[in-house]
Amino acid sequence: MDALKLIEQGSMKAEAPKIEIGDLVKVHVKIKEGEKFRIQVFEGTVIAKKHGGINETFTVRRVAHGCGIERVFPLHSPIVEKVELVRNGKVRRAKLYYLRDRVGKAAKVKSKV
C-alpha cells in the first residue's frame, strides 16, 4: 500500500487550487484539435467536490443560452491547466444540487464579504 501512496503523491499537482463549494471559478482546460492544443475557459459555480487525494473531482455548473451545463473535472488531471478563483461563495451545504431546479436570480449564490 505504501508504494501506491508514493506513486499517488508523485502524480499529484504541487499547487492544487483551494476551491470550496459555492465558489465562482474559471477552469482553463486543454482541448486537443487535430495535432494542436488550445486552452478553453469554462466559468461557473462549484456545486460538488467528491473523493479525495489523487481521485478528487469537482463539478462546475453554468447556464449558457438558457441551458444548464455541468462538467466534472479531475483536480489533478493534466488537462486542467489552472483553476482561477473569481468569487468566494457563502453556502451552508456540501452539495448544491438544488441549483439545478432554480432559474434566474434564484440560482445565484451569495458572495462572502
Image (spheres, rainbow, N blue to C red):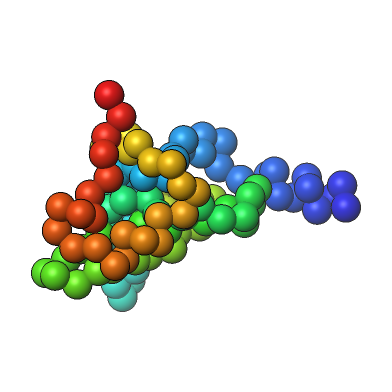
Instruction: Tell me which residue sits at (31%, 51%) in the image.
Output: 45
- Which residue in the rendered view is the most extreme toward the left? 65
Q: Nearer the viewer, residue 96 or 56?
A: 96
Q: Is residue 46 left or right of residue 50?
A: left
Would residue 8 be seen by someone viewing this image from the given angle?
yes
Instruction: Tell me which residue sits at (30%, 29%) in the image.
Output: 112
Query: Please, is residue 92 above or below residue 62 in the view?
Result: above
Query: Please, is residue 48 above or below residue 67 in the view?
Result: above
Would residue 84 be seen by someone viewing this image from the given angle?
no
Q: Is residue 85 left or right of residue 1?
A: left
Picture quarter containing residue 64? bottom left
Where is the C terminus found, in terms of image quarters?
A: top left
User: Residue 68 placed where, x, y %?
Assistant: 25, 69
Instruction: Tell me which residue sits at (15%, 52%) in the image.
Output: 105
Instruction: Tell me which residue sits at (31%, 59%) in the image.
Output: 99
User: Residue 19 placed where, x, y %?
Assistant: 43, 40
Q: Nearer the viewer, residue 53 or 34?
A: 53
Q: Is residue 5 left or right of residue 19?
A: right
Picture quarter containing residue 69? bottom left
User: Residue 63 placed where, x, y %?
Assistant: 20, 63
- Which residue in the rendered view is the most extreme toward the bottom? 34
